[in-house]
Amino acid sequence: MSELQTFRMLIGGATADAASGAVFETTNPYTGAAWATVPDAGPDDVDAAVSAARSALDGEWGSMTAFARATCLRRLGDLVAENAEPLARAEVADSGKLYREMIGQLEALGSWYHYFAGVAPTIEGRQIPAPNPNYLVYTRREPVGVVAAITPWNSPLLLMTWKLAPALAAGCTVVIKPSEHSPASTLRFAELIDRAGIPAGVVNVVSTNDRDTAAHLAAHPGVDKVAFTGSTATGRAVAKAAADNISKVTLELGGKSPQVVFPDADLESAANGIIAGVFAATGQTCMAGSRLVVHADVHDELVRLIAERAATIELGDPEAESTEMGPVANAPQYEKVLGYLETARAEGNTIVCGGGPDAGLGGYFVRPTVVTGVTTGSTLFREEVFGPVLAALTFTDEDEAVALANDTPYGLAAAVWTKDVHRAHRVAGRIRAGSVWINAYRVVAPSVPFGGFGHSGLGRENGVHAVDEYLEEKSVWVELSGGTRDPFTLG
Ligand code: NAD
């Protein structure tokens, strides 16, 4: 058996083990074997990381210019791209995602740091025309302070970067806590921080297998803002913890995103986009397009096209170039996906293809699954599976399509498939979701806002306004006359 790799945390600019010395193993979902040990931090380690972040805010970082912060961000972006390979390998080993997807993602990730390096020096206040005689009034935009960034297992470094890059651009300091299922890549990333010229304590990373320790970070009185991606249930707990401290919070949560297909759509292209939306990354993405809302006239043809392609999807070793779908990322998630398939059968839905584990491969492999005969009351219509499962139902007119698309507490993403330009924009405007793709799916960029309506979240990541989520606005009033005034009236 090969030796386990070891990883350490980053606290106050130094590599660190847990104060208790505890470690936990992280498992490769493809091999089923542990491949690395990581520190199992407790509340004391979180306290140390928050305290380091506070000191860094009050130290060199706090007095650096935005241009100097931008230089650090640019270097960090370069280092991420240069180290894409080891970072991608750590993500693949931890989560079972495809190497060919992760290497592309990691090579592109530097552009997020470069984009927010450009944004940093543009953070400006305003001079407001004096509302009262003899005053100069202006605003300053200042870092919100210490940020806790709590991330899930499905794309650890991408989703961490969506928080870290704007936070650093704004001048905040950060404590990152990756998921217990995929901590390794974030710990490897931490090794780049010092090389980017970022002062000690500005970025700290703690790993823990203990959800109470994660909760301790979210509820920490020394944290000014929590930036979270994960499930809606945990997001709700994080928001409550932040509320107790009157801390700011952004939440990137789950989804049950609709793919709305009109009868005039290019069905081959729609089938391809639907595959990208729900089977890429084994369906384990917050933006998975897991509800197919398709016009009755083209339902059978579209389902046939999707099922035919699904049957040829190559499952296997995530490291292999030809593999198209890897395993589900961990045992609890695997059980959860299979549970949903049982529920679909029990509720009388029809499994057109897939529908269970891949007998040949064992492990956590679930075959790409298309389910039809779903109704608005079906569990598969309402709940996020976070696996390779597409649930289809039909509509007959545009109003019904929009009503079905919006019949969800979520609102993260959606797609509209049609060649009719009027309808495309009309329907995109009526769907309540943070991102709507027209004749496309699963495209993101540093410059384009991403986030959810309803139970899919609070606030937006990416785009120039993402820095606003990490800034406080301060108004400064300057009395110009040097005189005095009636102290008993409001000025
Ligand atoms: P999760 O929401 O349980 O955990 C996300 C992060 O929050 C992890 O780092 C976790 O350690 C941390 N955490 C757990 N309890 C916490 C608490 N009380 N306070 C603060 N942080 C806490 O998600 P998961 O375990 O990664 O996956 C569970 C389910 O969430 C999946 O089955 C899937 O449906 C969903 N999920 C959604 C997304 C998304 O982007 N929408 C991503 C991953 C998982």
Image (cartoon, grey):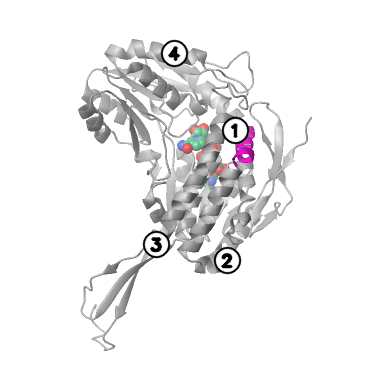
Secondary structure found at label 4: helix
Q: Residues within 10 Å of mark 2 (few under 14, many from 20)?
A: some
Mark number displayed over residue 201: none
The residue under label 1 is which amino acid type?
Ser
- 310 left or right, relative to 334: left
- 74 left or right, relative to 26: left
Mark number displayed over residue 55: 2
CB under 8 Å between discs 2 and 4: no
**Region in magenta:** 84-95
CB under 8 Å between discs 4 and 3: no
Q: Which residue is mark 4?
A: 307
Residue in front for this viewpoint, 10 or 227: 10
Expressed as whole percent of the image width and height from the top left, the position of residue 49 reads 61, 57
Q: CA distance from mark 1 to mark 4?
A: 26 Å
Mark number displayed over residue 472: 3
Q: Looking at the rendering, in which quadrant would you find the N terminus? A: top right
Expressed as whole percent of the image width and height from the top left, the position of residue 425 reads 24, 32
Secondary structure found at label 3: strand
Magenta span: helix, strand or loop, mainly? helix
Q: Name which residue lies at 37% across and 40% down.
A: 452
The residue under label 3 is which amino acid type?
Glu
The magenta stretch spans residue 346 = no
Secondary structure found at label 2: helix
- 357 left or right, relative to 257: right
Expressed as whole percent of the image width and height from the top left, the position of residue 177 reads 57, 48
Among the two numbered marks 3 and 2 on one chain, the one whose residue lies closer to the N terminus: 2
Expressed as whole percent of the image width and height from the top left, the position of residue 119 reads 41, 55
CB under 8 Å between discs 1 and 4: no
The answer to whether residue 433 shows anywhere in this view is: yes
Vertical position of residue 343 compared to residue 284: above or below:
above
- 141 left or right, relative to 106: left
Q: Which residue is mark 1?
A: 95
